[in-house]
Image (cartoon, helix red, strand yellow):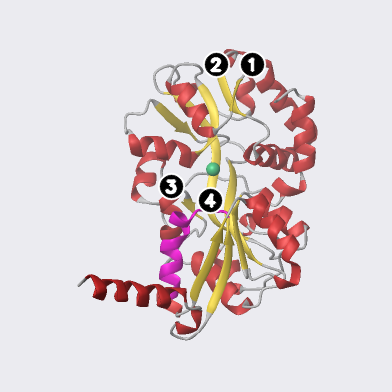
Amino acid sequence: MKLKQTAFTLIMTALLAMPSVIWANGEVVNVYSSRIEKLIKPAFDAFTQETGIKVEYLTAKEAELIERLTAEGKNTKADVLLTVDAGNLWLAKNKGLLQSIDSEVLSNQVPAHLRDPDGNWFGLTVRARTIVYSKDRVQPSELSTYAALGDSKWKGRLCLRTSKKVYNKSLVGTMIKSMGEDKAKAIVAGWMENEPSIEAKDSGVLKAIAAGKCDVGLVNTYYLGRELKKDPSFPVALFWANQEERGVHVNVSGGGVTQHAKHKENAIRLLEFLSSEKAQNLFADENMEYPVNPNVKPSPLIAEWWGNVFKQDPVNVASAGEYQAAAVKLMERAGYR
Ligand SMILES: [Fe+2]
């Protein structure tokens, strides 16, 4: 019995170690992903099931992947780069690591403001960065815009994540693009006048509000989703900022076809699939993000918490990258650590 089991294990190990040639049609697409396995595997499996194309992937931090793609150059195995934040996607494009794709399917499935105007990358999920508040100490009627968090009534009551995080660089970068440097500067200066407590993470901002250290803050919505999933009575709620104005700041997780892709057609098919009605919920729901495809509804849980739709700032998210350096400088000058 034991011998039989060992033989079985050996055969299985050998089979698993064999390259993708044993796959149905031998087709493959190679992905470098900064999104962790748990978030990408369900959608990749569905893609393979539908197309017969096997998805090989490697996950690592985005800086590492960008470095790796740069070093590998023409010899890279990667056909697709997946990462979060338009600022990172913009950087990959700017380093010449991606190529322009002309796909009607992608143009139809991904709204224009959530993809690179030159087709080098496409948003696949939407993440909004908006206001959160203490349910015990704040009324939603007291809230309105990002700028209004600079009102003196929030002095000593505001928590922000460190300006070093790309999410905040992107927030301020898109503000510079949509309202001009002076107005963006005035907003950040207003926050600083309220002497915000600076937290290392979005989850830290939420915990600080829950613990009574501050009353309002700015986070990506899915961080609140994570807390609510653990504890539905978590005492922090979400407020959609700027709904009477340009709309709430949004960002994306997304992907692009690499400059030296060996399986370009498969890579395009994968991006088309990930933004399709079939895959969007598989891809967005696990991290409690919003689908990028306007024909797809968010998960029932998200819809119940925050609704199906909200007004998004229509500024192209590529500006998060274009204005990243300006945003960093602006935050530094305003004393935002
Ligand atoms: Fe995040």
Which quadrant would the N terminus be assigned to in this image? bottom left
Between the residue at mark 1 and the residue at mark 4, the CA separation in whole angstroms equals 30 Å
Q: CA distance from mark 2 to mark 4?
A: 28 Å
Crowding at dot 1, Cα within 10 Å, few <14 / some 14-19 / many 20+, comes out as some
Nearer-the-camera pick, 196 or 69:
69
Q: Residue furthest front?
A: 3
**Which secondary structure is most common in the magenta stretch?**
helix
Ligand 1 under 8 Å from disc 2 Cβ: no
Q: Is residue 75 visible?
A: yes
| Residue 98 place in picture, x, y as percent | 71, 65
Pointer 1 with pointer 3, Cβ within 8 A: no
CA distance separating discs 2 and 1: 8 Å
According to the picture, the residue beneath numbered tag 4 turns out to be 126
Q: Are marks 2 and 1 in contact (CB under 8 Å)?
A: yes
- Which residue occupies 46% across, 74% down? 17
Q: Which residue is the site of mark 1?
A: 194
Question: Which stretch appears magenta?
Answer: 34-48
Would you name the residue on which mark 2 appears? 157
Ligand 1 is in which quadrant of the figure?
Answer: top right
Q: Is residue 4 above or below residue 43?
A: below
- Circle 3 is placed at which residue position? 288
- Amino acid under label 4? Val
Occupied quadrant, residue 329: top right
Q: Tell me the quarter of the image containing the C terminus.
A: top right
Counting residues from the N terminus, which is met first, the one under dot 1 or under dot 3? 1
Decide if residue 191 is on the left or right side of residue 238. right
Q: Splitting the image into 4 quarters, where does residue 172 fall?
A: top right
Bin the neighbour count of mark 3 within 10 Å (Cα to Cα): few under 14, some 14-19, many 20 and up. many
CA gap between label 1 and label 3 equals: 31 Å
The residue type indicated by label 1 comes to Asn
Q: Residue at x 56, y 23 (%)?
A: 159
